[in-house]
Image (cartoon, helix red, strand yellow):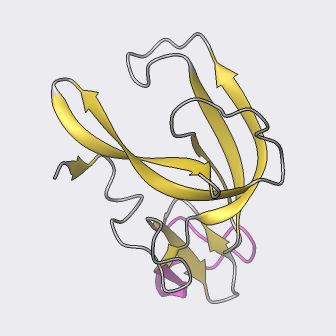
Amino acid sequence: MSTLRNPSLYADEGTPAVPRAPALRGIQCRCGHRAFPPQQRGCEVCGAYGDALVQILLSGCGRLLASAIVHRHAAAYPRVPFTVVEVALDDGPVVRGLLHGTAPAGLEPGTMMLTGFETVQIDGETLRDLRFLPAEA
């Protein structure tokens, strides 16, 4: 099995709420605010920092807010065309990520999305990278 591309951002395992979808690594403040990606600079809502922020796993489940197909991209990875999606996670944060494969017909805001892995080749190394896909897929 190949390794994760960004293990500091996501996990192999899911959460109890959505065990079949890889989890995102986030933080939760003592005020209840949840954020992704994890950082220690302080809560966006109340400004608390340090021990007030604890690392949590966020489910990979949410609703599609928007998507855009990228046809020109300066970097070698990801290869064009690819689709960027913005997903409102059921756990709170709004995140951006890549869509698994090509955008299916009828992909519209409100579509339920789940995280999954796509095997990619980067500089000759085989890695698993996080992607979103429609929950019905």
Residue 78 or residue 52, whichever sits in front: 78
Horizontal and vertical percent position of residue 108: 82, 42
Horizontal and vertical percent position of residue 54: 48, 82
Residue 3 or residue 112, whichever sits in front: 112
Query: What residue lies at 38% left-to-right and 16% top-to-bottom?
Result: 76
Left or right relative to 122: residue 43: right
Left or right relative to 54: residue 5: left
Residue lying at the far right in this picture: please name it: 109
Decide: is 92 above or below 99.
below
Horizontal and vertical percent position of residue 94: 71, 58
Query: What residue lies at 71% left-to-right and 71% top-to-bottom?
Result: 92
**Residue 46 part of the magenta-drawn span:** yes
Horizontal and vertical percent position of residue 84: 63, 34
Specify the principal SS of the magenta part: loop
Decide: is 126 above or below 31.
above
Q: How many marks?
A: 0
**Residue 21 part of the magenta-drawn span:** no
Decide: is 26 above or below 127.
below
Q: Residue 107 occupies which quadrant of the picture?
A: top right
Query: What residue lies at 62% left-to-right and 79% top-to-bottom?
Result: 48
Query: What residue lies at 59% left-to-right and 70% top-to-bottom?
Result: 42
What residue span does the magenta drawing correspond to?
Answer: 39-55
Left or right relative to 88: residue 25: left
